[in-house]
């Protein structure tokens, strides 16, 4: 699976989420990209597309949010405030990775977590001009 998207507005993010939703179900997905690149926005639409009309908040402070959708559990992590791998272990991160769920991880590239995971996908967001975002999915 290799996709590329150019997003000009949040509607484009929603359409991209619709497109790839079937391919990423029950996978571990790294959401990479700078602050404001659109990682949480993507998660918000995926929760909606999987059939839950809950408000999606950034887990920057809660670290982990869970959504019980019609298409299974979505677990949303934000590792921005996590300092090191010991701290990751302390919040139960590695145990959570074994759960049967669609697991979305913002700032996954801060750590070397791919060495603990066999299968994962990477969605990279890059802000180009003010409102143009490039996305690659691998
Ligand atoms: N495709 C897009 N087009 C325009 N604005 C966007 C897009 N995606 C996100 N945004 C806006 O950018 C801001 C930050 O988005 P957010 O998803 O919180 O970023 P991140 O989680 O990567 O820090 C929000 O105000 C959001 O509405
Ligand atoms: Mg975010």
Image (cartoon, rainbow, N blue to C red):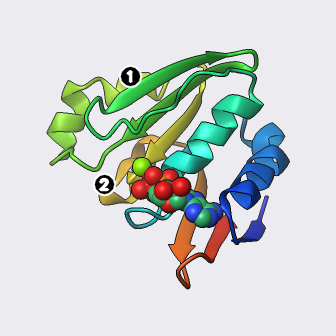
Q: Is residue 28 above or below residue 137?
A: above
Write the residue at 31% across / 33% down.
Answer: 63
Q: Residues within 10 Å of mark 2 (few under 14, many from 20)?
A: some
**Which SS class for mark 2?**
loop
Q: Nearer the viewer, residue 37 or 53?
A: 53
The location of residue 109, given as percent across then percent down, is 39, 59
The location of residue 119, given as percent across then percent down, is 60, 44
Q: Nearer the viewer, residue 27 or 106?
A: 106
The location of residue 29, given as percent across then percent down, is 57, 45
Label for residue 95?
Answer: 1
Mark 2 or mark 1, earlier in chain: 1
Label for residue 111?
Answer: 2
Write the residue at 53% across / 74% down.
Answer: 126
Write the residue at 59% across / 75% down.
Answer: 131
Image quadrant where one finds the C terminus: bottom right
- As measured in the structure, the alpha-carbon distance from the residue carrying label 2 to the one carrying label 1 is 16 Å
User: Hey, which quadrant is residue 34 in on the image?
Assistant: bottom left
The location of residue 3, given as percent across then percent down, is 77, 65
């Amino acid at each position: 699976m290799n996709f590329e998207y150019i997003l000009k507005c949040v509607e484009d993010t929603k359409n991209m989420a619709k497109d790839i939703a079937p391919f990423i179900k029950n996978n571990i997905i790294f959401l990479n990209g700078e602050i404001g690149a659109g990682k949480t926005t993507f998660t918000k639409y995926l929760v909606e597309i999987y059939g839950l009309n809950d408000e999606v908040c950034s887990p920057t402070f809660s670290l982990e949010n869970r959504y019980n959708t019609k298409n299974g559990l979505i677990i949303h992590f934000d590792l921005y405030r996590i300092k090191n791998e010991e701290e990751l272990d302390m919040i139960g991160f590695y145990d959570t990775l074994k759960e049967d769920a669609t697991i979305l991880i913002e700032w996954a590239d801060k750590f070397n977590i791919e060495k603990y995971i066999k299968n994962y996908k990477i969605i990279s967001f890059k802000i180009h001009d003010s409102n143009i975002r490039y996305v690659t999915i691998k």
